[in-house]
Structure formats: C-alpha cells, structure tokens
Image (tube, rainbow, N blue to C red):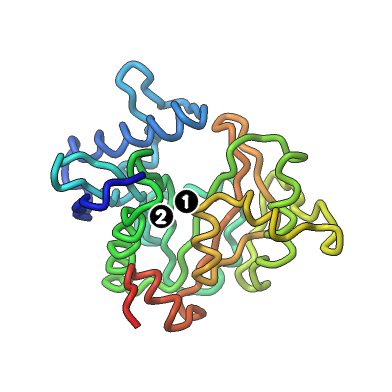
Amino acid sequence: MPDPSFEFSVRLAKSEEDLRAAQALRYEVFVCELGGDGEMVDHDAGLERDRFDPYFDHMLLTDRKSDKVVGVYRLLTDERASELGEFYSEAEYDLAPLKATGRRLLELGRSCLHRDYRGGAGMYHLWNGLAQYVSERNIDVLFGVASFPGTDINALSAPLSLLHDRHLAPEELRVRSRRYQSMDLIAPEALDRRKAMVEVPALIKAYLRLGGFVGDGAYVDHSFNTTDVCLILDTQRMNARQKKIYAGRNDG
C-alpha cells in the first residue's frame, strides 16, 4: 500500500532530463509490466518514447521526499496537434466528430503511476494538475486512448460490452475505431454488469465516474499488447460534484 506520508508536487517537464524521467517511468510500466514495444523504444537505456514526445507537454508527479518522478501524463493541445499535423490517437480513431465541434481539444495519453504509488493520492494530485492545465487553456473536450492489458477479445468481452451498452459517447462526439473491433459482444440482458465493471481498469473507471464516454469500437494494438478504447470527457457535461472529484477536491 502507498505510504500515506508521501508528499507530492506536480509540474510540467522543463528539460531533457525531465523528459527522460517520464520516459523511464513509462518504460517500467508499459514495457516491463505490460509487455509493450515500439519503433523508438530504447531497451538499452530503459526509455519508452516515440516521435510524438517533442510536441506534448509532459506532466510529472514527483515524490518530494525522494525527488523521484512517480507519475506522468502526456498532454497535446489542438494548437500543437496542428503543428504536428495530427493527434496521436488518429492512428487508431477517426477524430472527425471531435474536430467538427470547433471546440478546444486536449489529448491525454501515457498516463501511469509507479507501482508503489497506486491506490493512493497520487492520481488525485495528477488530476488536480490536469484540472489547472485545462482551466488555464480553456479546454472544452478531453480525449485519449486508454488500454485494457492483453489482446484476447473473448477475455475482454464483458467489460467491453458494458462500455458499449452503458457509456457510448453521444453521436456528436462519437469517434470510431479505424481498425474496428466491435464492443457489442454480449447482449445487455445476458451481461453481469457488476462483474464486468470489476474487470474495467481503474483509470477507465475513474473517467466514467467523471461522466466520461467511450468511442465506437475498440482497437487491438498488438505492438503494445493492449486493447484500446477512446475516452472522451466533455467538461460542460460534468456536474459540480464531478468537477470537485476531477480537481482532486474532497470538500463538500
């Protein structure tokens, strides 16, 4: 269990050293734990990186006592995506519905915590930092791919069916998988919803609690050994209670 005495700080990466610390944590989580890989993954240096990294802001959660980076978020505004020519998620999902809204977009990705800091306050501190980032830039819609470990669709049929049945995005925000894997795999009346929700990863459940939705269809990513869904969070649809949770506040 995480030590309750942990003290955290949240900031954006400012240097190459900061970026390498984020990539090292990503390597530990996405490569060592989940078995992922990629063209630019540096196994010798222990860095999980890709060609998109220079365009993203990298939010770092640091344990003040050890000065160790223990959590990261990767953030791409629509302005920076225009410079790049695409969002990272566009390799997996057709984002035309989101772009057509004309609203300010922010793509989230590579969110992870060191194993020793999961289940505690670390994620709330990252969310607090994210909420401030969103407020300062007047972001309207947040989105990004989130992953189930593994690529066995049969094993994931219950949680995917639950997401499709209960949390499908409204049509105006409903992005679609480019390599379409249906999530409508088990009829609603045959689905054990409680059991299925237990099988949904914690990060995805957290966004659902905030009023998040999922796009149409999953994307099976064999190179990363994951099955991805696209999460979409419309800040205007969040109620007051949800906004308090999102900003890491527990008052009231």
- Residue appearing at x 26%, y 52% in the figure: 4
Is disc 1 surrounded by few (<14), some (14 to 19) or many (20+) residues within 10 Å? some
Relative to the observer, which residue lies in front, 91 or 130? Answer: 130
What residue is at 86 percent from the left and 58 percent from the top? 190
Quarter of the figure with residue 49: top left
Rendering coords of residue 73 (x, y %): 35, 50
| Helix, strand or loop for disc 1 | loop
Q: Is residue 99 among the parts visible in the rendering?
A: no
Q: Give the percent coordinates (x, y) of residue 105.
A: 44, 66
Residue nearer the viewer, 60 or 104: 60
Which residue occupies 27% across, 47% down?
A: 3
Quadrant location of the C terminus? bottom left
- Quadrant (top left, top right, bottom left, bottom right) of the N terminus: top left
- In which quarter of the view is residue 115 placed? top left
Q: Position of residue 57 (x, y in %)?
A: 29, 51
Dot label at residue 81: 2
Q: Is residue 239 above or below residue 204?
A: below
Q: Residue at x 75, y 55 (%)?
A: 161
In the image, 212 versus 70, the foreground residue is 70
Whether residue 215 sits left or right of residue 73 in the image: it is right
Q: Distance of mark 2 from mark 1, alpha carbons?
A: 5 Å
**Please, what secondary structure does the residue beneath circle 2 have?**
helix
Amino acid type, mark 2: Ala
* N-terminal label among 2 and 1: 2
Q: Mark on residue 62?
A: none
Kindly identify the amino acid type of the residue bearing the numbered disc 1. Glu
Q: Which residue is mark 1?
A: 86
The picture places residue 155, in percent across and down from the top left corner, at: 73, 39
